[in-house]
Amino acid sequence: MAEIIGDNIPNIPWRDKPEGYMYPVWRYSENPVITRDNLFMANSIFNCAVVPFGEGFKGVFRADMRSRDQTLVTGSSLDGIHWTLDKKVIFRGYDPRLCKIDEKYYLSWVNLTPHGTTIGIAYTEDFADWTQLEDACYPVARNGVLFPRKINGEYVLLIRPCDRGHTPYGDIFLSHSKDLTYWGKHRFVMSPVKNWEMTKVGAGPTPIETSEGWLLFYHGVLTSCNGFTYSMGAALLDINEPWKVIHRADSYLLAPHETYELVGDVPNVVFPCAALADAGTGRISVYYGAADTSVGLAFTTIDDVVDYIKEHDLITGK
């Protein structure tokens, strides 16, 4: 059996797998958990980052306003399902990720500059005051995701270099830093392989440390005659050399099926960018953007997802 290496989250949001359900990831039956109605003047609230904090949870949410400005706001929840969002904008940009390293909470996001998108990095200890650091890269990049601890004494960041539009290519790379200022030792991680992800791939939530390696949820994009379709896949990375993919599922774990995933500002999108993992039970809760309009919640366990990856492994050819 696989194990999650990390903290216990006894109040992790959770619903058991429906009886007779055969797939490794299942949706919260009352999705979406966050809509534009959670914040006045919001056009849409979708991709988000969530971490345990105090007796509940804190989050950073992409809120596109009625002006269509792309902003990040914070939110609080006691149960991870019912959220109160703050009106104050903490940063401009989109697609946040959060992780706790030592006693600080680090935020990475797609930062907007006159020359294109960079990966912004900031930290907080209380979700009230933020310290912004140097951007992690020159334009243009997206999907900047920090690992939740140093590896071999260095911070590690997953990124997807791209261009200023909806790039027709997209591979995941990795960079190292000793001080969160200077980044280097870039390594290739993965490219699109199967049809469901053939246009591009990008890192999703903060990688989860497990006894089987780093569990990486990621998004893959199919280009069909009807446009893009975003789905969620998963891979396991080497624990000490995380640019090495040791197992990778050949098929998606979650794809747009429900109305709130199929219909919205950007149809046909399941975009994972936050996950809670409880070491005590092996439960994992995944937050995802649905049709670039609302936030959905899905569930799995470490055994469900690792077994699926290995049973449908691109690396070993099973």
Image (tube, helix red, strand yellow):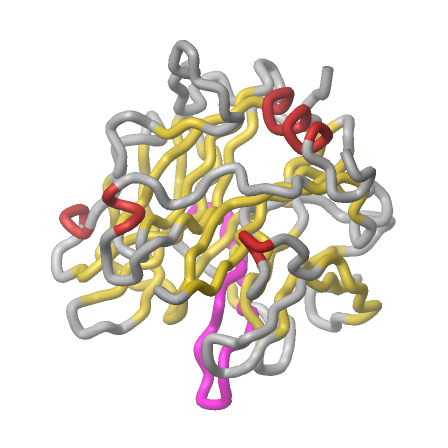
> Closer to the camera, 53 or 80?
80
Quarter of the image with the C terminus in it: top right
Tell me if I can see residue 103 in this picture: no
Residue sitting at the far top: 19
Residue at horizontal 51%, vertical 52%? 97
Quadrant including the N terminus: top right
Residue lying furthest front: 225
| Vertical comparison of 27 with 16: above or below | below
Q: Position of residue 119 (x, y in %)?
A: 56, 69
Which span is picked out in magenta?
A: 108-127
> Residue 14: which quarter of the image?
top left
Left or right relative to 5: residue 228: left
Q: Residue at 48% across / 17% down in the picture? A: 10
Q: Residue furthest bottom?
A: 115
Quarter of the image for residue 185 reads bottom right
Q: x, y percentage for residue 197?
A: 57, 56
Give whichever of 273, 247 is nearer the camera.
Answer: 247
Depth check, front residue: 209 or 130? 209
Rendered view: 203 above or below 23: below
Q: Quadrant of residue 28?
A: top left
Can residue 316 be seen? yes
Q: Does the magenta-highlighted stretch encompass residue 16?
A: no
